[in-house]
Image (cartoon, grey):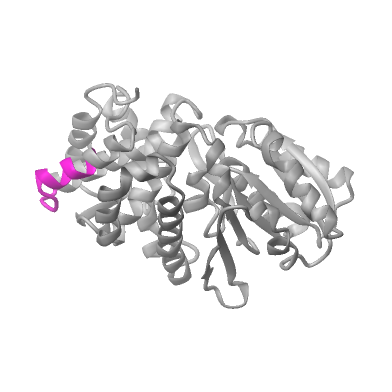
Amino acid sequence: MRSLSVDLGDRSYPIHIGPGLLGRPELITARLPAPRVAVVSNEVVAPLYLERLRRGLAAAGVAVTEIVLPNGEATKSWETLNHIYDTLLAARCERSTTLVALGGGVVGDLTGFAAATYQRGVPFIQVPTTLLAQVDSSVGGKTGINHPRGKNMIGAFHQPLAVVADTNTLDTLPDRELSAGLAEVIKYGLIRDLPFLEWLETNLERLLARDGEALAHAIERSCADKAGIVAADEREGGIRALLNLGHTFGHAIEAGMGYGAWLHGEAVAAGTVMAAELSRRLGWLAPGDVERVRALLARARLPVAGPDMAPEQYLDLMGHDKKVSGGKLRLVLLERLGHACIAAAPPRDDILAAIAAIAACSGHG
């Protein structure tokens, strides 16, 4: 097992990474304020892992309430959130009850937002079961739901008590979901960790083949990169926004195509190529750098072009992004590979041209 910490003073918490961690309930029970939890999962993950987690917790004397949600990005809604509240209230869950998110990013975001708001805030623990959740969404305390006009527009910052990432759960992850997670892994190399980017270029096939040692290294390195940024800027007042490379374009793809048509990581991949192309047009990246980004994402079996929406439609949807400030769009771009920056109000014509260049052909196989 590999362990690291997100350093937030008295709200610091551990991230545990390794195989077989679902069989180590002490990683969870050691963090509980009371011996009662509500485990939130979904109809795909629950049949695979919920009983194992429940059995271990029950053997340690923890009372378990189970909440199983439908699967998919479209369920990240007020209706699903209310279902969680209804179950918690029916089970008479108190403020000392800890919510446990067992699943991918959707389950984690929903559970975290429920924990942030139920009885004005209860504890929660992340047990991520997808690569994307293990390297990104389970760490950092961002929680929320989608709105038809924008992704993650309603939510709260609410840090978990712990993150327990059992890498064995990746054995049952569909290939498409594994690739979607790699989009976020590659992001870390691009924004602040050039040696990691170079490692990924050398070891990508090992990750696609689910080599346990390679996956554990990639997850730990990604979490370490994110933990460092979160510790410096918990509520995204500055450098934390760099974690959104490709996301403003990607969120427009998700909203425009309908939530769930593109996986989040797929949309981020296409959006990352758009961000690289815009960076080239601003004179920061060389054409070879853009091709290097595109080639690595393509090797990860990710789309490297956006859907054929009109560039103006992209821009309209991007206008709902949370990074808009004073009515002006701010974008995370690349000054060079391994170094991202926040560009305030890039020229509109350059943005449209970058979108048009990357959305010119179908990039979603």
Give left or right: position of 157 versus 357.
right
Asked whether the viewer can see residue 327, the reply is no
Asked whether the viewer can see residue 17, the reply is yes
**Is 303 placed above or below 145 here?**
above
Q: What residue appears at the point 40 percent right and 54 percent down from the top-left corner? A: 218
Dividing the image into 4 quarters, which one contains the C terminus? top left
Q: What residue appears at the point 74 percent right and 59 percent down from the top-left corner? A: 122
Question: Which of 240/263 is in front?
Answer: 263
Magenta includes 140?
no
The image shows residue 159 at horizontal and vertical percentages of 60, 62
**Numbered-mark total:** 0
Q: What residue appears at the point 40 percent right and 37 percent down from the top-left corner? A: 179
Dividing the image into 4 quarters, which one contains the N terminus? bottom right
Give left or right: position of 347 versus 1.
left
Q: Which residues are magenta?
A: 282-294
**Is 213 placed above or below 179 here?**
below
Quadrant of res 72: top right
